[in-house]
Amino acid sequence: MRYSLRKDAGFTLVELMVATAIFAIMSVMLFAMLDGVRRQLGFSEEAGNSLRELHYVMRRIAMDLSQLQPRPIRDELGSGWQNAVNADSGNNAIEISVGGWRNPMNLPRGSVQRVAYLVDGDVLARLHWPVLDRTLSTEALRTEMLTGIVSISVQFLDESGEWSEQWPPLGGQQDQRSRPRAIEIMIEHEEWGEIMRVIEIAG
């Protein structure tokens, strides 16, 4: 009688350990790659949202400035008047009378609104008041428009073609109803650098 010995086909323990190690290494590399792609997509989405927010804010500011109205307001004590456009290089604010205030509920008010833009820390905020001729008890409604502000500057073009950082300009006409011919606004953002717009004032 003849016997034959046949070696069973399969992997040895060493081969299984090597295959397992290779699979583990490839899994770690694939996970790291997918995680990098996920984080990159997140950064891209954040940057896109930030850029859209910046464009919206610049459009909103341009819309307000382009609708400047020659309407001074009474000061909060009722003893004098504030200019239709108030701005000073010594502070981070501009206050203006803006037309086109919608009134879908037909409230007993006009279509001109008092609006201010100011920088508080690294935040650009928009303020508006429910009435034009406010008192000390009239509270402004504040909307934070944009974060990451490094600086903001505003310049005004007068009738003689000169630019000024203050309105009304020093030494110029002091008519409280006066408006500049154009306004240049430049915002320096920590992520997007300097963004500048020049808005022509109609009328």
Image (cartoon, helix red, strand yellow):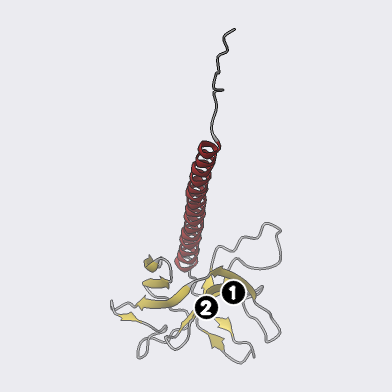
Horizontal arrangement in the rendering, residue 23 relative to residue 201 (left or right): right
Q: Compared to 107, does 77 lie above or below? A: below
Horizontal arrangement in the rendering, residue 202 relative to residue 7 (left or right): left
Q: Compared to 15, does 63 lie above or below? A: below
Q: Which mark is residue 118?
A: 2
Horizontal arrangement in the rendering, residue 113 relative to residue 55 (left or right): right
Q: Compared to 175, does 39 lie above or below? A: above
**Which corner quadrant holds the N terminus?**
top right
Helix, strand or loop for disc 1: strand
Write the residue at 71% across / 58% down. Answer: 105
Estimate how packed mark 2 is, as few (under 14), some (14 to 19) or many (20 or more) residues with alpha carbons within 10 Å: some
Disc 1 + disc 2, Cβ < 8 Å = yes
Q: Please state the horizontal and vertical placement of residue 107, each as a whole percent of the image.
A: 71, 64
Front residue of this view, candidates 170 and 30 = 30
Amino acid at the residue labelled 1: Leu
Q: Which mark is residue 127?
A: 1
